[in-house]
Image (spheres, rainbow, N blue to C red):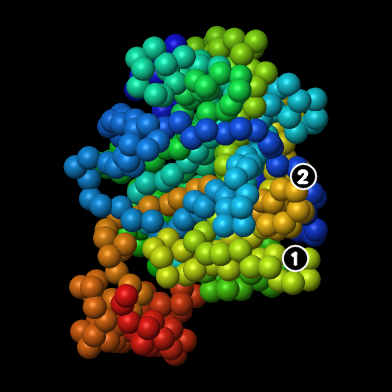
Amino acid sequence: MKNIESTACLVCLCAGSVLGASGSPVTLSPTNGRVVDVAHIYFNIATGERVATAVGGGETIGRGLADSYPVWSSLVSNPCAEFGYTTEWFYGVDNNANTTSLATDITVLDFGDIAVDTVVDMVHINWVTGHADTDSDSDGVGDGVVGLAGEWTYWDADNGRDDNLIRLPLISFMIVDLPGNILGPEALSGYSASIDLAGLFSDSMTFEIGDTDGDSQGAAFYNPGQWNEDNNFDGFPDTDLDQDGLFDWAWSVRFAQPGTRDLDGDGIIDGDFADSMQPIGISFGVGEGEAIDDGDGTWAWELDMVPPGATGQEDAFAIYAPPLGGVGGPILYAGFFWFGGFACEGISYTPVASFEHVLYGPGSGSHCCPGDINCDGIANFFDISEFLVFFVAGDMQADFNGDGVLSHFDISAFLAAFAAGCP
């Protein structure tokens, strides 16, 4: 079997349609199983560099590249841990052993809000799998299950609606022969990976979410001028359906089972279909914050917006089915789903319907507090001066509330952040 060092990373620009949702979500059950986090893998799409680190050995990072920092983060896998729950749920995206119409070849799409004009140069992904694998080199990482693949795609202007007029593709990448389960039948193996998109010229897959001014800021891919467009003529901007001043975006994942697809285009189906009767899925995640009991039988997740990468998500996701006939055409909207409402009570907690994912951007933003415009570690007169220079010049760096226009609301938002100071 090929391991991830020799695994091909198939890259393509994405087209087609997949869109959001309306109405009340359908209740699904999360997937239950003993999940053991096995390893974290750093992989650079442009250079092929691969570094694997067993969980507990420290996080892996890129080598020789500019620092990246989180610009959107959903990493807390168990938001009810402080209430004594130790179960780790995951969501089984694909399972050929299941007989439901959504058992295989489906696409799961999760969505959230982010500041406009955000450049992304690295993403954090994950998968949980029961597919049996070997570890021939004893590095703590599966060698790779032939024919087991995952395809991750990123979208502009998407809030999970069933509307193919508004969402726009940014990038899509596929990793084939994903590492599998090396723990035996008693547990499932969980993996996370940092996929570095940075490269030179044609090698780069960096992208900008929510462009407002036609300036990609050095990113290789972007959709120019998306802010405030209303392509479906419903009276709401396609990019901010929840009207919170942030840009609506989404990411999706679709897995391929062994023995079901010709991944390398050589005319031969990859892998053994007998190996496909196992689940593969993704872990749950939420932004930084805390679980709040509303006292009326409902719970909420109170976001902490101070940490780098803090963001908002909705307690729901969308699912799309394969094209009719299974070949070609757009994937079909199958519905809007959740797990019955997030709660840390009862026999077992109810997970929030958001999935683990992180976007990283170039620079050293993790060292800056919101009011520290020049990023020197303190909020002082020089930050006020720099903000005013941007504002007077019409520079969108002064768009402090991220609504795509410069107004007194940006001044108010900046002054509030400045007054809060730096910790």
Q: Secondary structure at mark 2?
A: loop
Residue 21, image quadrant: bottom right
Residue 66, image x and y in percent?
Answer: 23, 50
**Tag 1 secondary structure:** loop
Earlier in the chain: of badge 1 and badge 2, it is 2
- Judging depth in this view, the residue of 262 and 230 nearest the camera is 262
Q: Which residue is mark 1?
A: 298
Q: Residue at (75%, 65%) from the top-left corner?
A: 298
In the foreground, 73 or 13: 73
Q: Position of residue 273 (x, y in %)?
A: 64, 12
Q: Is residue 329 left or right of residue 202?
A: right
305 sits left or right of 107 in the view: left
What residue sits 68% from the left and 68% below the top?
293
User: Badge 2: few (under 14), some or many (20 or more) residues near its Cα, within 10 Å?
Assistant: few
Q: Which mark is residue 61?
A: none
- Observer-nearest of 205 and 97: 97
Q: Residues within 10 Å of mark 1 (few under 14, many from 20)?
A: few
Whether residue 378 is visible, yes or no, is yes
According to the picture, the residue beneath numbered tag 2 turns out to be 28
